Every structure is written in structure tokens, then in C-alpha cells.
Image (cartoon, grey):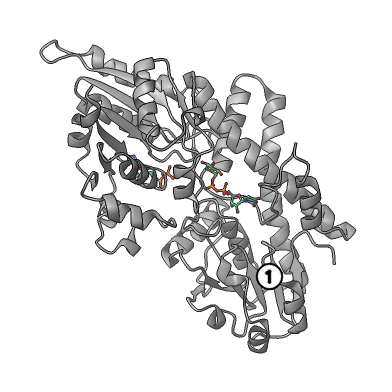
């Protein structure tokens, strides 16, 4: 294969596929990269002339897309054609948790993986390296290989035989910092058993990643490492969140505890920030995948250990909602609550598994009227998320007067309480005197992200509750 002519196709133009391919295109000008998707609107949005309208918001992404798009990076819905001409096909499709059938609620729904594997098998020509990018259950590469090989075996002999190498190259980027994570990864993991294919992918990363950071493993280690890394990160959040509740009842301060614990170099300071619970498309799904795998192999103790991480996460969201109800005299009927932040964390427009979903839905179910502000999330996603949550719990979604406001100060007018659910920077420097004047009394502020100055809120005459701070 001539390195100068390597062509890449990425199936799935989502949060992983889009930014990852944009960075590869920017760093490897000799590659031709086509990002394809079955969702025509997504492709149109990626091709939008106005770079502020890309379907994924990531700091630094628009600039890179502006430099590479229609030069060596193309967004297209011509899936077959793009696969056919490619040497390497990345699979970056969605793998949500299965909603029904065997493994419902735990196992990954692999329908998109299977269908894209079939697309590759049918459209590819000659030898194709297939790279798993999406987070997948361990042994998925086996399924993919099986599908691919069943097509190559069916060759009539008229055309050259199709052959495939399957690699696992999990993505460790975090949303909001995706570009930085892609440019300066802690490591790049390549799992596989075909040295030639591994080296080809390695050569691509060597354009900007130091050699010592590129680790080769067998396929299963690579797949399991991704699940384990996410399980460890999520476990740290559940650990600190569990202690936040202990702080509130003992008079300790979770920030002081977190700092004291994190300065132990064996523990480390990162991922010890308390909050309303972890969200995002990966943590819950990956832990539940691990739980499912362990149960499958009869490792029930291990499964129970990891399942607790998810249970504590759900408990944290639930206890926050209950604290809000209790502080507002146990009654939310017709009270106006201002929600600041709906994304699962700052600097992203993604709401998947956002703790805001269940907290808002439970408040609505208590009769509250919500006014939601988020600088990046659109109204349609918020309504869809809340409706889905209530439907899954068999709770009704009445026309509860859900409102949206783009101006923070307008959103808090006549409110009984402000609830900060995402740590957007805009929320850390608010004019609390001004806010207090426009709220109904006694007004409350609930800060689940610990981003506001407690004294400023108190001196404005408002009541404040901060996660993990015993007052
Ligand atoms: C995560 C992993 O970090 C990434 O490596 C993997 O590829 C995908 O999953 P992501 O979900 O984008 O990335 O975001 P991350 O920054 O890990 O945050 C996940 C959730 O944990 C967010 O809801 C965030 O608010 C929360 N969090 C994170 C905390 O509550 N406290 C912390 O200290 C860190
Ligand atoms: P992730 O966060 O893993 O990137 P997303 O849901 O943001 O997940 O993106 C996955 C994308 O993959 C979606 O835009 C979806 O339409 C696309 N997709 C799923 N299956 C296929 C397929 N068979 N062919 C092309 N695109 C697909």
C-alpha cells in the first residue's frame, strides 16, 4: 500500500467520528478522509458554510474543519462509494444500551455496529483494515470478523478476494476537550493481531503522537482497557459523590476533603470533583457492559462491585432532587424553578445521560414550572430527553409550561429557586444582588457544581445549598 495514497472512510459523523477525523486530516495532509453517515442532516450540518453551525460543538473544532474540509476531509452520504475506495475504514457508530430483549438495560445495542460491518463487507474491495473506534463490548471484534469473513468466503472467484484485518483503536477523548485530547493523548491504544495493519495505523498517529505513547496489545486487551478506563474514572466520581453526602451531615467540606485526599500522589487530584452525578454517552454504558460481561462469565461479585458505581450515581441525582423539594417546604406545585445548565458537563451541547434529565423530570413530576437556560443545548433535545425519561418511568408529561430562556437574568425573574446543574463559566460570576431583587422570597440557590461564591449569594439575602458542604 502506498502511504501517499492512503484513503480512509469513517462510518459515523458523531461526537467521536467528526472530531477524530478532523484532527487526523489536519495532521496528515497526505490522507484522503471521507466521513459518512446515514443521517443526511448530520452530513449537511458538517458541510454548513457557517462553521458555528457544525453538529458538534467542541472548542477548536470549527477552525480545524475550516482548514481541512473539502481539501482532504469530506463529509458525504455516499457510504458505499467511500468504503469501496478506502484502505482503512473506521467504525464510529452509536452503541447505546439495549432497551429490550436479552441484556436489556445493560448490554450494548449492536445493531449499528452489525449493519456498518455488513456495509463494509459488501462494499469493500481488496484488502481493508477495519478499525473499531466506538466503545464496544469485549469480543465485538469477533462478531465483526465473523461478518466480514462470511462475505469474503462467498466470493465467486470472478473478482479478487476480499480480505480484512480488524483492529481495536478505542477513543479516549472527553467531550469539551476533544481536540486537546486528540492532539495530546495520554496514549493511543491499538489492539490487533496483524502487525502490518497495526504498523500502518501506528504510522498515521506517529505524525503527531510520540512513539512511546502508542501502545500495541491484543484485540481483547484493547477492548477491555477502554471499558476499564471508563469504569475507573466513573468509580472515582461515585466515590467522591458518596463522600459529599457524608460531608453535608458532618460539617466537613467536600473540597477540602477532595484536596486533602488528592494530594496523595498514589491517588492523584483528577476526577475527584463532586457533582450531580456523571453523565455522557460512555460511563454508564461502559460500566453496564462490564457488569454484563462479568455476569455472563459467572463473576457475580465483580459485577456487583461495578454495578454499585452506577447505583450511587443514580442515588446522587435522586437525593439532590429530594433536597430541593424538602428545602422548598415539601411543595413545588406551581413554583417557578430556574435551571442553569442542561448539558452533561460544560463546553458541550451533548445531553446524553445528563444528570439534568432526571433531576428536571422529577421536579416537573412534583408540579414545578421550569425555566431552563443552557448556552449550547437546544430546546428540542431538552424536551425529548425529559419526555423519554418520564415515558420510561411510566410517568405522564403534562404540558407543564416548560420554558426556555437565552438570557440568564430573564430566566430567574420571579423564581423561587435557581438550580445550577452544569458548570458553565457564565454561571460563576453572576450579579447576585440583581438576581435576588428579581426572585420571589424566600429564594433559594442550589449549586450542585460548586462554582459560585457562597458569601456573595448569602449577602444578597438568598438561601444557599452547596453540594458536599456542611453548613
Ligand atoms: C469520558 C472519558 O473521560 C473519556 O476518556 C471517554 O473517551 C468517554 O467518556 P466524557 O463523557 O466526554 O468522557 O466526559 P468526562 O469529562 O469524563 O465527564 C463525564 C462526567 O463526569 C460528566 O458528567 C462530568 O461532569 C462528570 N465529572 C467528571 C464529575 O462529576 N467529576 C469529575 O471530577 C469529573
Ligand atoms: P458517538 O458519540 O459514539 O460518536 P453519535 O451518536 O454521536 O455517537 O454518532 C454516531 C453516528 O453514527 C450517528 O450520526 C449515526 O447516524 C451514525 N451511524 C450509525 N449507523 C450507521 C451506519 N450503518 N452507516 C452510517 N452511519 C451510521
> Which image quadrant: the N terminus?
top left
- Say few, some or many: other residues with alpha carbon within 10 Å of mark 1 (under 14 / 14 to 19 / 20 or more): many
Can you give x and y, in whole percent of width and height, for residue 245 in the image?
A: 79, 54
- Residue lying at 70% horizontally and 73% vertically, measured from the top left: 445
Q: Is residue 79 above or below residue 328?
A: above
The quadrant in which residue 13 appears is: top left
* Observer-nearest of 385 and 342: 342
Can you give x and y, in whole percent of width and height, for residue 203 in the image?
A: 36, 28
Q: Is residue 288 above or below residue 431?
A: above
Q: Helix, strand, or loop for circle 1?
A: loop
Q: Is residue 359 above or below residue 202?
A: below
Q: Is residue 12 visible?
A: no
Q: Residue furthest left?
A: 158
**29 sits left or right of 204 in the view:** left
Residue beneath disc 1: 452
- Residue lying at 80% horizontally and 62% vertically, measured from the top left: 469
Dot 1 beta carbon under 8 Å from ligand 1 = no
- Residue lying at 67% horizontally and 79% vertically, measured from the top left: 416
Can you give x and y, in whole percent of width and height, for residue 264 in the image?
A: 78, 42
**332 sits left or right of 339 in the view:** right
Q: Residue furthest right?
A: 250
Q: Is residue 64 visible?
A: yes
Can you give x and y, in whole percent of width and height, for residue 17 in the image?
A: 37, 43
* Observer-nearest of 245 and 178: 178
Amino acid at each position: 500500500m502506498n502511504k501517499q495514497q492512503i484513503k480512509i472512510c469513517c462510518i459515523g459523523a458523531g461526537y467521536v467520528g467528526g472530531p477524530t477525523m478532523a484532527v487526523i486530516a489536519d495532521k496528515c495532509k497526505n490522507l484522503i478522509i471521507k466521513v459518512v453517515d446515514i443521517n443526511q442532516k448530520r452530513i449537511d450540518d458538517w458541510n454548513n458554510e457557517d462553521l458555528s453551525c457544525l453538529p458538534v460543538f467542541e472548542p477548536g473544532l470549527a477552525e480545524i474543519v475550516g482548514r481541512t474540509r473539502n481539501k482532504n476531509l469530506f463529509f458525504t452520504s455516499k457510504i458505499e462509494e467511500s468504503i469501496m475506495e478506502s484502505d482503512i475504514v473506521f467504525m464510529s457508530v452509536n452503541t447505546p444500551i439495549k432497551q429490550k430483549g436479552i441484556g436489556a438495560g445493560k448490554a450494548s445495542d449492536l445493531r449499528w455496529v452489525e449493519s456498518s460491518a455488513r456495509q463494509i463487507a459488501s462494499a469493500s474491495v481488496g484488502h481493508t483494515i477495519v478499525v473499531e473506534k466506538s466503545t464496544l463490548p469485549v469480543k465485538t471484534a469477533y462478531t465483526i470478523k465473523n461478518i466480514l469473513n462470511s462475505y469474503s468466503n462467498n466470493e465467486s472467484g470472478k473478482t479478487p478476494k476480499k480480505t480484512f484485518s480488524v483492529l481495536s483503536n478505542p477513543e479516549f477523548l472527553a467531550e469539551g476537550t476533544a481536540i486537546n485530547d486528540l492532539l495530546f493523548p495520554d496514549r493511543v491504544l491499538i489492539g490487533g493481531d496483524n502487525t502490518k495493519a497495526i504498523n500502518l495505523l501506528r504510522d498515521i498517529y506517529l505524525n503527531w503522537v510520540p512513539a512511546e505513547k502508542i501502545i500495541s496489545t491484543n484485540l481483547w486487551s484493547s477492548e477491555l482497557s477502554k471499558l476499564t478506563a471508563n469504569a475507573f474514572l466513573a468509580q472515582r466520581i461515585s466515590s467522591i459523590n458518596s463522600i459529599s453526602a457524608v460531608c453535608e451531615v458532618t460539617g466537613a467540606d467536600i473540597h477540602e476533603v477532595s484536596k486533602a485526599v488528592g494530594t496523595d500522589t498514589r491517588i492523584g487530584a483528577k476526577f475527584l470533583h463532586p457533582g450531580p452525578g456523571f453523565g455522557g454517552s460512555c460511563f454508564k454504558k461502559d460500566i453496564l457492559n462490564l457488569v454484563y460481561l462479568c455476569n455472563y462469565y459467572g463473576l457475580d461479585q465483580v459485577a456487583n462491585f461495578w454495578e454499585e458505581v452506577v447505583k450511587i450515581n443514580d442515588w446522587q441525582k435522586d437525593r439532590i432532587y429530594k433536597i430541593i423539594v424538602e428545602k422548598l417546604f415539601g411543595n413545588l406545585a406551581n413554583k417557578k424553578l430556574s435551571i442553569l445548565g442542561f448539558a452533561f458537563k460544560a463546553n458541550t451541547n451533548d445531553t446524553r445521560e445528563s444528570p439534568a434529565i432526571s433531576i428536571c423530570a422529577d421536579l416537573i413530576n412534583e408540579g414545578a414550572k421550569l425555566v431552563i437556560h443552557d448556552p449550547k443545548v437546544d430546546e428540542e433535545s431538552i424536551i425529548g430527553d425529559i419526555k423519554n425519561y418520564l415515558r420510561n418511568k411510566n410517568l405522564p408529561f403534562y404540558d407543564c409550561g416548560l420554558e426556555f430562556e437565552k438570557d440568564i437574568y430573564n430566566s430567574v425573574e420571579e423564581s423561587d429557586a435557581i438550580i445550577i446543574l452544569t458548570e458553565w463559566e457564565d454561571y460563576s460570576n453572576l450579579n447576585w444582588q440583581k438576581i435576588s431583587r428579581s426572585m420571589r422570597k424566600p429564594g433559594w440557590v442550589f449549586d450542585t457544581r460548586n462554582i459560585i461564591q457562597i458569601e456573595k449569594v448569602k449577602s444578597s439575602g438568598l438561601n444557599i445549598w452547596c453540594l458536599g458542604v456542611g453548613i
